[in-house]
Image (cartoon, helix red, strand yellow):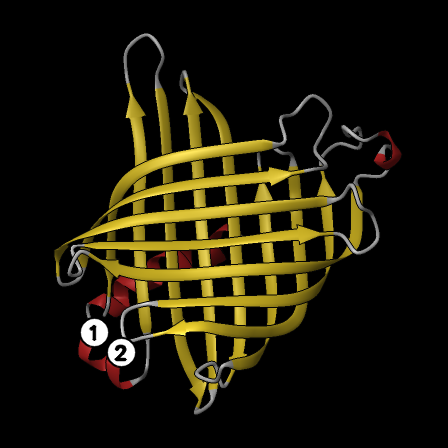
Amino acid sequence: MKKVLCFFLLFPLLLLAQDKETDTLNFKASLALTGFWQGGNVETLIFRAKSDLSFKPWKKGVFETKNSYVYQEFGKKKADEDILSLNFLHYNPDANISPLILAFVSTNFRREIDLRYLFGAGATFRVLKEKKNSLKFSLTCEYEQTDFNKSIFNREEYNGVPSINTFRATLWVNGKYHLLKDKVILSHESYIQPSLEKGNNYRWRLDVGLEMPVWKFLNFKINYLDTFESIVIKDQRQEDSVLTFGFTLKSY
C-alpha cells in the first residue's frame, strides 16, 4: 500500500519534467509538500504530501487520483501516519451533470485503522465553470469496510468486532477560485459521509488551500485539514486539525 502511494505521490515530478508532452496527452499533475516544525522544549514535526493526477484514457473519460500522506511526531515520538488514496473515473466531465465511479483506500496510525476501503458510484453537478474558477457538487453511494486494530469503541454497540461494514451516501463539494488578479488561489475539497444504516456512524473531511504563485509552475501554499470520525477507538478524540505551510509544484 505504501509503495503504491509513494508512486502516485512522486509520479507528478516526472510529468513536470515533460510539460509539453503531458499537455499533448491531456495530463495534469501537481505535488504539494507542506509541513510545520518546532524545536526546543517541545519538539513537533508535521509533514504532509499531496499529489493530484488526472488524464484522459479515452475521449470522454477522465481518470483522477488524489493521494495524500500525513506524518506527525511529538517529542521525537510518532503520533500519526495517515495515508489516503481517492480515485475517480468520470464520464463526460465537461457536461453540467456527469456520472462517476470511485474507489478509496486508506490507513491511519493514530485512529488505529489497519485498512479502509470504499467503492461506489454517483453523479457530479457543475455549478460554476469558468476558465479559472470552478465549483461542483457530487452525490455518491458507496459500500465501505474498515478494519481496526482494536475492537473497543466510543460507542458500545460496535464493541467486539474489529471490522465495521456499512453503505454510505456522500456529498462532495469542490471549488477553486483565482482572486486578486491571480495573485491568490483559493481551493477547497470537502465531503460528509453518513451511513445509510446507522445514524451515529458518519464522518467529514475539510481540506482548504491558499496558494500564492511564485513561478509559473511553483506556488507557496498554506493548507488547513480538518477531519471528524463519529466512531473511534475508546478514549480517542473524534476530530483532528492540521495547519501546514509549503509549496506546490504543478505541470500546468
Amino acid type of the residue that numbered disc 2 sits on in the rendered structure:
Thr
Picture quadrant of residue 52 = bottom left
Which quarter of the rendering shows the C terminus? bottom left
The circle drawn on residue 251 is none
The circle drawn on residue 22 is 2
Q: Residues within 10 Å of mark 2 (few under 14, many from 20)?
A: some
Q: Residue furthest top?
A: 41
68 above or below 35? below
Regarding mark 1 in the picture, which secondary structure is present there? loop
In the displayed structure, does residue 37 sit left or right of residue 111?
Answer: left
> x%, y% of residue 18?
20, 74
> x%, y% of residue 130?
32, 75
Q: Mark 1 points at which residue?
A: 18
Picture quadrant of residue 239 = top right
> x%, y% of residue 203?
65, 45
Regarding mark 2 in the picture, which secondary structure is present there? helix
> Marks 1 and 2, how far apart in space?
6 Å
Q: Residues within 10 Å of mark 1 (few under 14, many from 20)?
A: few
Amino acid type of the residue that numbered disc 1 sits on in the rendered structure:
Gln
191 above or below 126? above
Q: Residue furthest left?
A: 215
103 above or below 94? above
Closest to the observer: 207 or 128? 128
